Image (cartoon, rainbow, N blue to C red):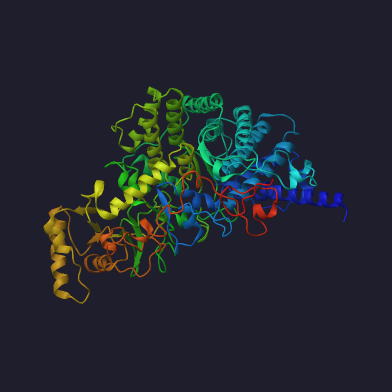
Amino acid sequence: MNKSYISKSVKSILAALALSAGAAMALTSCEDTLERPSFTADDIDYVFSDVAKSDLYVKGVYRYFCLEEMFRAANTGDCVTTANEDNFTQANMQRASYNYDPYMPWVFGDVYRQSYNAIESCNLGIKRISMLDESEQRNALLAELYILRAYAYHNLIRFLGDVPTQWKAMEDCDIESADVLYPTRQPRDGIYDRIINDMVEHVNDLPWQSANPYVTNERLTRNAGLGIMARICLHAAGYSLRWDLETNDVNTLHMARRDDGARVREIYEIADKALAAVIAQGENHLIQDTQDESGFMYLFRNFTLGNYGPTAPEMMWMIAQQGEKTNGRLGNYIGVTGAGSGSFFAAMKALQIKLPTFYLSYTEGDKRRDVTCPMYTIGHSGEVDVHCGTTYSSVMGGKYRVQWAQAPYNSGNRNIDMAMLRYSDVLLMYAETQNFLNGGPTEAAKQALKQVRDRAGVGSLPIPSTEGEFLEAVMHERQWELADEFILRTDLVRTNLLDKFITEAKADLRELSEHTGKYADLPTYRVYHKSLNEGIYGDNFLMVEYFDLTDPEEIAAIATMPKATQTAKIKEVREAMKKMVEARGYTYNNDWYPINLFQAITSDYNTNSRQICGTIVVSTWGLGSTITTKATGKDENGGTYPEWIDGENGLFFGYKKNFSELSPFAGNLTGHPLVDNPRLTQLPGYPGAKSEY
């Protein structure tokens, strides 16, 4: 067959794919619903014939950034959240513990595929929209595409390292060229330099948020563009796993910044200036407490509900996930979900949990804790849904909890937007840039950090004075503030703190399991109040009432939980519970129940306690089973560490310093990068690594 014909056919197909990302996949926004028109490559001229049609195309490109891989695998491995699937061999369990495998494949494959789709769509849009008559709107559309292309490359680099590049639309490329068909890895520093220059050149063509022509912040504004540019700069100037691209020798793997210290500083200065511009503009602020709830709860309750007006000053950029065609499962896996068959909220499973050591790391009184990691889930008992207190192996994620949400489109499409950038992130990045550029925290850095802490109710915490200690303080603050916002895993890499934080997290979990060290005096028993769920979407429930037991006599009275047939013992336990509850000023009506926090939520003791003391019988839990059905305590597990803490599949079991900071490419089947591209080299040390190209 004629090569020229093949080349034209491939270009036509690629152009059609780019259109499917843009106008053909125009996002369902919160203010309207767009039907998906049928476009082909022949429609390119029509799609880009004017600014209005081009606007729809650009709108559609955002869809490539709503990756389930981002809020599942990429949301774990950060010493905050881990996967809780139904078996340890599930890919998300493996990626959460850095046990990559290119053949299974346990890698970041969707990031690779979808990022290049986004890049091609941006390349086509940049070329075609540049041909329109210049106007403010045309320039703003180009700025969006340059920043979205930068973000796509950024995602590739932060998960995969040095990657192939394509800067022109495929319709302008020589498809017969090996460099086009089989591109090789390109140095990340050069890629970062180019996309940073693109953003610096175009970001000011975006409107400020106050002049945003769109109803919500589901499109980039100048405020968000500057914040995203700063985020990318911090990665570009930060640490990453590097190796010799010429030899691909595993012995050259090491964590380092780029070699040019002057350029590192210059990039930090770009980030610092961008963040300072957002702050000085004065259009964004942290949502503060209301009469009824904390500002942090108000923010995420309204965001999850889809009430974006009150959240706009802080939620600077989110990606629409609404309606039939442009929706996702964000609310399915993260957080307090449905309770199985019979539940008002339908059957869903929470397949991620918060590490108990993260929950316990919050300062007492921190208003973010029960929003981010509440210790309850929804259980269906009889004819009602009940808020059931949980244990240390079942700490939930709460920012996108099902009962705060609007009604889903269907069970797999939850109508919850994907949070991309908040003003608190801007403040914490600014604290970080000020600290780096001045060899320690400036007053501006301290005040930025304190703003975030003040809103959380912990503004009196001490602020370190040295550069290294302040950076660690900022990173811990990012964990407490930005959990479940899909950026913390690679934050730890770019600051070269991943190894330190993982080592500390594993040691802390073992101490918690042993009831030793900082956890030696931690109560074993907690008494929860039975709380019925209202069976509505959009409620304002935060956390189950509880009190911890520390008195030895009270503990002895409930340490053994009778079976349902032991009538006399049941009466004795209930009388003891009544005495404890009333001593704390509450009333008791068989609606308070003790839970052993170091056992599984499904243990015999906890199951019997809920039934006998709280009249709660849950037959099916909406939870994955690898962790939540297991104990946390070593003694409670028969004298050995639970498997998820320190077993063959224990947390972070696959992690190796100077090796696991990046994902390899998939390389087993057609469609995998290493199979489709014979010139692409594997990350050194993994099967399929090549050095001959």
Quadrant location, the N terminus: bottom right
Q: Splitting the image into 4 quarters, where does residue 391 fall? A: bottom left
Image: 564 above or below 154:
below
Classify the position of the C terminus by image quarter: top right
Spot occupied by residue 413 in the image (x, y as percentages of width and height): 53, 57
**Going by the picture, which residue comes out furthest to the right?**
2
411 w.r.t. 267: above or below: below
Q: Is residue 474 left or right of residue 558?
A: right
Q: Nearer the viewer, residue 502 or 353?
A: 502
Q: Quadrant of residue 302?
A: top left
Q: Nearer the viewer, residue 544 or 137?
A: 544
Residue 309 visible in the picture? no
Q: Residue at x 37, y 42 (%)?
A: 480
Taking the image as shown, residue 690 lies to the left or right of residue 598, namely right
**What residue lies at 82% left-to-right and 49% top-to-bottom?**
7
Rendered location of residue 14, percent (x, y): 74, 49
Q: Nearer the viewer, residue 381 or 554?
A: 554
Give how far across and how far down residue 537 sits, in percent.
Answer: 42, 56
Residue ID at (42%, 24%) = 439
Q: Return the residue nearer the eye: 441 or 331.
A: 441
Where residue 276 appears, x then y in whole percent? Answer: 48, 25
The answer to whether residue 54 is left or right of residue 278 is right
Residue at 41% x, 35% y is 286
Identify whether 4 is placed above or below 379. above
Query: How many numbered discs sit on the rendered protein?
Result: 0
User: From where the camera sits, is residue 382 visible?
Assistant: yes
